[in-house]
Amino acid sequence: MMRQIIYAIQKCKEIYTNFVQQLVKSKNNKILSHVDLADDYVKKNNYQLAFKYYDKAARKGNIYSQVQLGHFYYDGNSAIAKDFDLAIYWYKKAAEQDDIGAQINLVDLYRHKNQPIDSAYWCLKVANKGNIDFQYKMACFFEEGYGVDKNIEKSFYWKEVSAERGNVDAQIDLGILYWDGNDFLEPDLTKAFYWFEQAAQQNSSQAQFLLGANFYAKGLGGININIKMAIYWIKQSANNGNSLAQCYLSRSYMIGHGVEENAEQALYWAKLAAEQGDKKGQLYLAEVYYHCFEDFTQAFNIFKELAQQGDVESQSWLGYLYLNGEGVAKDIEQANYWYKLAAEQGNEEAIEYLSEVSENF
């Protein structure tokens, strides 16, 4: 009799377990069907019905649907008005179930809402999962004291972790840190070179320029001076749009530094820098027109525009052009005016000219 009772109990347990499993399976299938329906409605741009079914699935704990609702509220659409608070609500539901995409969105949303502690909390979660961009962001948070206590050592730790895994911004920051040093870190130009080289090889125009113009051109960090390598990296940087590198190349081609003199190349690189609004590039462009092409009118027009914007070197140049009647009619009064402006701001050539003028009167 006892054996029959035990058997009956076991059978009941099996039936119950099977029932629960079928119930869960049915429930999951229903949730997935809601998700599928919602996805289909999104494809048809029917956001109202898509929202309805994502909402049903999200309320039953479906992570994907919670994230989709977060997106709906974050972006807004024809059916749902933007609502960052509700976006946070749904992203947080998914983030608490360890969804990294939702955690990433929370970092930025909380930052947008000026809630640094919450932003830093989720940033650390993402950083600990190995995301190199958020490891770097965590480094910046510790550096700024954003949402966490300011901590230079922890900032350095996260920069190093991120840099070692290939984050270019972290590599550049480490290069600068080792270049300058700080209370925590001794300057080390060899390590600075290493990190700039890592970033340069990933096509960072900033690192490429620093590598060429400082380490190879000047021999910093025990690196042998190598003008060929300097020009190589500077040209890489210039081709990637770095206006400083473009200015450097323009001057190099104008005076034959590390390359053969080439007026057309000097003009080409100066124009590229000038077109980006780089004041030095505009100045070099005027100088190329003056020295390489003897186009004094073009040079005068550029110098005048820069001088009127307060560029001291251009003011001195205007004084010189008015004095000699190059690109403009000779005008001693205008020459004195522009030289005086430049001299008042410490331009040595202008000071020397005015000194000579005063000695002659």
Image (spheres, helix red, strand yellow):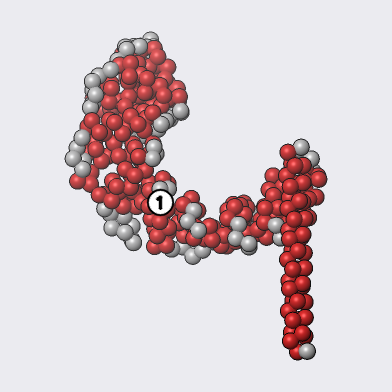
Q: Give the quadrant of residue 220.
A: top left
17 vs 224, left or right, is right
The residue under the point 30% across, 39% down is: 211
Q: Where does label 1 land, which residue?
A: 165
Residue 45 against residue 260 in the figure, above or below: below
Q: Give the quadrant of residue 153.
A: bottom left
Viewport quadrant of the C terminus: top left
**Which residue is the extreme one toward the bottom?**
2
Determine whether the residue tagged by mark 1 lies in a helix, strand or loop: loop
Residue 264 against residue 29 in the figure, above or below: above
The amino acid beneath tag 1 is Arg
Asked if one can make out residue 85 in the rendered structure from this viewpoint, the answer is no
Q: Which of 160 and 285 lies nearest the eye of the viewer?
A: 160
The residue under the point 73% across, 44% down is: 39
In the rendering, at what x and y percent does residue 237 appear?
36, 33
Dot 1 surroundings within 10 Å: few (below 14), some, or many (20 or more)? Answer: some
The residue under the point 32% across, 12% down is: 293
183 vs 256, left or right, is right
In the rendering, at what x and y percent does residue 41 appear?
77, 42
Asked if one can make out residue 104 in the rendered structure from this viewpoint, the answer is yes
Residue 219 against residue 238 in the figure, above or below: below
In the rendering, at what x and y percent does residue 14 appear?
73, 73
The residue under the point 77% across, 84% down is: 4
In the rendering, at what x and y percent does residue 58 appear?
73, 56
Residue 106 against residue 344 in the figure, above or below: below
Q: Which of 36 and 196 lies nearest the eye of the viewer?
A: 36
**Number of marks present in the image shown:** 1
**Which residue is the extreme one toward the top?**
329
Viewport quadrant of the N terminus: bottom right
Q: Which of 85 and 37 lies nearest the eye of the viewer?
A: 37
